[in-house]
Image (cartoon, grey):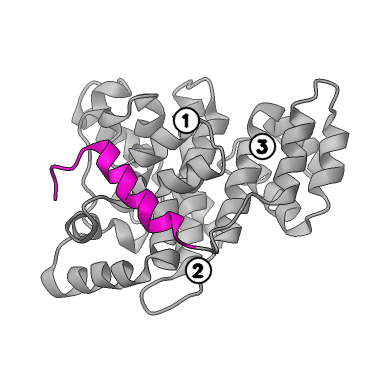
Amino acid sequence: MFEQTTSEIKEKIRKQLSGIGNLPAIPHIITEVTQLLDNDKTSASDLCKVISKDQALATKILAVANSPLYGLPRRVATIEFAIVIIGFEHIRNILLALSLLDTLRVRKSLDWNHNEYWAHSLMVATAAKRIADDLKYPKSGEVFTVGLLHDLGLVILNKYMNYDFKKIVKMVKNEGVTYHEAERIVLGYDHGDIAEFMLERWNFPPHITDAIVHHHRPSLAEKNPVLASLIHLVDYMTYKLGIGNFSWDTGYDFDENIIDILGFGNHEYLEEFILSYQELFKWHFESLN
């Protein structure tokens, strides 16, 4: 089970998911935005007109821009200004991420709290962007996108592979293993691998897909291990600090390799770094709720 190659795992997931008839397609609004972004003459006003057609999406963009951890210097009141501040380079991926999560929304059940899932996803996204900025990572906008979608595979698992999802939940309850261990036992792969199928289907950039696939083992990321490590760090921080954490991360398996990848030097310094964000995390999480 654990000796499968990457290509064998991808093919297995592709077979399982490609037979599902109601997998979501890319919304028309994203296609419109993509076409506009391909035109050098497109302005923030042009994008604003298209995005404003979807009020739910527009509201989420403003919420992102005004998040305490997103790091903008002042309140953003309009979509046009949000586009200018976020930047054309990242706006498409953020819109894609928000649309994908909204399309795949799963109703609350005894085994799934979607509000907790959303709060955790937004917490990781905004905190990872803030930490990326603090560490002088040059493209913190893409860190936000990866953070928002890092657990995308869990929603797909719940919504389209529910038999396996329930089997995993039952194993965790009855045998005391972590969710991540149970995924590997039941499926032979994990939710990062599952996300890859949908991300490729929705035309996300390969380095973003790679970081999401490997957010639990960032040292294995081939395209950009620093990007994957930033998400892994913040995902771990929510668990370690107990702020914005998600039940699926109980017993989080920390990849020690990120200490070198992110240049922390040693574990003691990393622990101090994590604790230095505790109050900021609390403040931000309270604002989410």
State which tag comes first along the sequence, 1 or 2.
2
Examine the residues drawn in magenta and state their main secondary structure: helix
State which tag comes first along the sequence, 2 or 3.
3
Query: Could you tell me how far apart the alpha carbons at marks 3 and 1 are, in whole angstroms?
Result: 15 Å
Residue 205: image location, x then y, percent = 52, 31
Residue 114: image location, x then y, percent = 48, 67
Residue type (three-letter) at the residue carrying disc 1:
Pro
Residue type (three-letter) at the residue carrying disc 2:
Val
Tag 1 near tag 2, CB within 8 Å: no
The residue that disc 2 covers is 106
**Mark 3 element type:** helix
Q: Which stretch is magenta?
A: 1-20
The residue that disc 3 covers is 92
Query: Could you tell me how far apart the alpha carbons at marks 2 and 3 are, in whole angstroms?
Result: 24 Å
Disc 3 crowd rating (10 Å Cα; few below 14, some 14-19, many 20+) is: some
The residue at the far bottom in this view is: 110
Residue 15: image location, x then y, percent = 37, 53
Residue type (three-letter) at the residue carrying disc 3:
Arg
Q: Is residue 40 above or below residue 276?
A: above
